[in-house]
Amino acid sequence: MYCVSKRMEIAGAHRLNLSYESKCQNLHGHNWIITLYCAAKELNKDGMVCDFKHIKEKIHGRLDHGNLNEILDFNPTAENIAKWCTQQIPECYKAMVQESEGNIAVATDLDFHLDIYKLL
């Protein structure tokens, strides 16, 4: 089993669509810290789980310095962004999204975990 992680800082703005009154319904920005965790039973033909550059292109390249409400087609909560990140990289089984100090959301692909354990 091989595992890698990629940590990125992304500057981005969003506003949340909520069922209650909140300042977060106004457009505001964060310097997000997004960490992806990827795994593979075997290394690919290039000797990698996946290329760090490809992870950066798919996540950082798409989100950095953007209005997440315009880029993404869902309510851009930290939880939803974490889920989206796990769906962008096939080898990704976990994503942590920190939108501010002390506020972190984690999405884990449990099916990925079960598939990996079956291979062991």
Image (tube, rainbow, N blue to C red):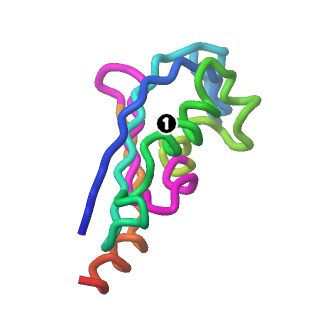
Residue at 42% from the left image edge and 34% from the top image edge? 34
Towards the viewer: 103 or 112: 112
* Image quarter of the C terminus: bottom left
Q: Quarter of the image for the N terminus: give it.
A: bottom left
Left or right: 6, with 62 as reference point: left
Which region of the structure is painted magenta? Answer: 85-103
Q: In this view, does 53 lie above or below 15?
A: below
Viewer-nearest residue: 6 or 50: 50
Residue 107 point in image, percent of width and height: 42, 52
Q: Which amino acid does label 1 sit on?
A: Ala
Can you name the residue that lies furthest to the bottom here? 118
- Is 38 on the left or on the right of 15, as rendered? left
Would you say 56 lies left or right of 106 here?
Answer: right
Q: Mark 1 points at which residue?
A: 78
Estimate how packed mark 1 is, as few (under 14), some (14 to 19) or many (20 or more) residues with alpha carbons within 10 Å. many
Looking at the rendered structure, the number of numbered marks drawn on it comes to 1
Residue sitting nearer the eye, 46 or 90: 46
Residue sitting at x 64%, y 21%: 25
Left or right: 113 in relation to 52: left
**Is 73 covered by the magenta stretch?**
no
Percent across and percent down for residue 112 are 40, 71
Image position of 12 with respect to 84: above or below: above
Q: Which residue lies furthest to the front in this view?
A: 46
Dot 1 falls on a residue whose secondary structure is: helix
Query: What x and y, as percent, mark residue 14?
Result: 63, 23
